[in-house]
Image: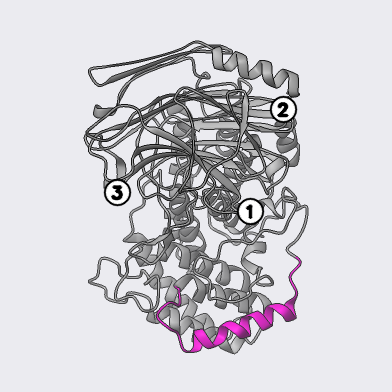
Amino acid sequence: MRKLIAAMLLAGTATTIAAATAPAQEAPAAARTWGADKAAGGRELDAMWPRVAQPDDQVGIRGVFRFALESAGLNWRPERIAPALDLARRMQDLDPASKTYGNFRWRYGQSAVFDVNGVEFSMFQAGLMHRLFGDRLPPDARTKLEALIDTGIKGMQRHPVKLDYTNIYLTQAANLILCGEAANRPEIAAQGYARLDAWLAFTTGHGVTEFDSPTYYGIDIEALAAIARYAARTEGRAQAAVALRYFWADVAANWWAPGDRLGGANARSYDYLWGRGYLEAQTWPAGWLRALPELEGAGWIAGPRANLVSMLDAAEWGPDQEQADALRRQVPRTVVQKWGAEPERIATQYVGRSFSLGSAGAGRGGDDRMLVGNIGNSPDFAQMILFMDGRGDPFGRNKQAERQGAMKALHLVPFLATVPRGPEILQLLAAGPGIEMKNGDKLDRLLTQFTIPAQAEIWVGDKRVQPGTPQTPTRIPAGALVSVRWKDAVIGLRILLATAATSEGGGAAIELVREKVGDPASRLTIVHAAHEPTGQGLAALWLRGAEGIDARSFARWRKAFAAAEAHVEQHGGVVRLNVAGTRGPMRIEADPTHGNRIRTEGAEPAPKLLSVNGREVGYPILTRAARRIVQ
């Protein structure tokens, strides 16, 4: 069936249709607007102008194109657009013999192209500028823009992007369509449509690989919205609209409404504690946020920009409200989705009224969050995140510059095995010498961190406790039940296994700490090694959530969870976990040293793509799309 669907999707745009100019398609009605003021936007552009006219080393290419696009959108001092495009041209690799010909230096002061995604981010803005505002550009600015696009097309053609690199792949597809049509080069636009075909076929079989990213889902929706609204081919616009319907079904199903954010585990987040990101560029106009978000400023020229929203308005696409409401009304709900071909590439989230728990079965990279919990009734509650840390950075504060200049705080990517079932998660993590970890992680210590929102009560066994300080931590006994409670909700955690990653071996210390007064979260830390580890560190944890809990039932709940049967075995490098979950046994058998998940049992059934409470909701969206496109 999957091969048939893939063939149908690919056949859908194999038919040659003339790329005649078509009217822009309107996005679904938004619940609110950005409320920009033109005069204020002009002042913001004026404040940026000196750094465009005389750039310093830190001026970024995205900011240069954004200045030009927003100037065109507001029709503010249009004589400044051509000089801005001249600056972009100086940042473009113009050597035809170069591997990065047509691409852009990320920052003005860099000696070469270090981030090859620069051409995708740049050409997205260039394509929108030409499509929406080309007729109002001064003649010299339009000529310069078309020269940038012509060379930028060559840059994209020299930048191969894998299908599972979702945000860049979709952005490149949108760029080739918009820029190819802007340049009156149908063969280039056809490459973009073919990429859209291929991504839809791939996603029908594998799901979105950069799953539930609070950062990159915003870029995915932007790219697809640009195709759905402005592409010339009717079937291309229809395909993009269907893909958008799928993305919004995913977002709605995983939405944690009390926190105004995606609730579960996710790929690619740069916000450890809150899970905020560029997706808010879409969820704000959709009416899903209580407060106006402060969107990330990657690449912007520094200064106020609240009224520079031409790009946001141009690439907005809201949810199918009926579909979204139907999904969000299901509380509690269990959401399961695929994000790759391997059986462990599954993400699961249980969404209750007062808490949620989500996990994934494997790690991708150091910016993923593979176990996330939520409690509380507002966005002011930090999320509960479980991850391994080799730098002593539990809240992602210690950001470091990558080669292209981006500042990121990345955690470890350990061996991981997970069994989620309803409001419970059983997870095994392992890192240290002898265990191959992604990214070639270097360890100056080895910790397992679990963050706890500051507003919540923390109980150890039957006693409420307070976090200690880094100098005098509150020690947690091995095997104790740690319960995080707020009002009628509780998330409990049993540490079944915590080994020291030192030559002495044995059990690891467990501590509860508030780093400093006023922090939004505390940390529960398993100290596998306070210095560079010399052995493997293992952590096995069992989490269970509940709601509708008063003081009396809380005591009963603690007693029942603490007494629930759990068995742990280690033999010959193999770890076996077996617990009595509320919905049946949950088991993990794994060999972390060799990266082998021998057996995982008791998890939620895997979907075809995306299921909610056992009903498949994702696959039918794409199969209906295939039928419509072929017809």
Of labels 3 and 1, earlier in sequence is: 1
Locate the C terminus and report the quarter of the image it occupies.
top right
Please, what is the three-letter code of the amino acid marked with disc 2? Val
Label 1: how many residues lie within 10 Å, few (<14), some (14-19) or many (20+)? many
Left or right of 130 in this view: 88 = left
- The answer for how far apart the CA atoms under marks 2 and 3 are is 43 Å
Please, what is the three-letter code of the amino acid marked with disc 1? Glu
The span shown in magenta is 35-60
- The answer for how far apart the CA atoms under marks 3 and 1 are is 35 Å
Of labels 2 and 1, earlier in sequence is: 1
Tell me the residue at 26%/73% (across/down): 96
Whole-percent x and y of residue 211?
50, 40
The residue that label 3 is drawn on is 444
Left or right of 442 in this view: 161 = right
The reply to whether callout 2 and callout 1 are in contact (CB within 8 Å) is no
- The answer for how far apart the CA atoms under marks 2 and 1 are is 23 Å
Q: Was residue 54 drawn as part of the magenta stretch in this picture?
A: yes
Q: Which mark is residue 280?
A: 1
Observer-side mark, 2 or 3, equals: 3
Of labels 2 and 3, earlier in sequence is: 2
Please, what is the three-letter code of the amino acid marked with disc 3? Asp
Whole-percent x and y of residue 280?
63, 53
Whole-percent x and y of residue 512?
51, 39
Label 2: how many residues lie within 10 Å, few (<14), some (14-19) or many (20+)? few
Q: Secondary structure at mark 2?
A: loop
Q: Was residue 176 drawn as part of the magenta stretch in this picture?
A: no
The residue that label 2 is drawn on is 331
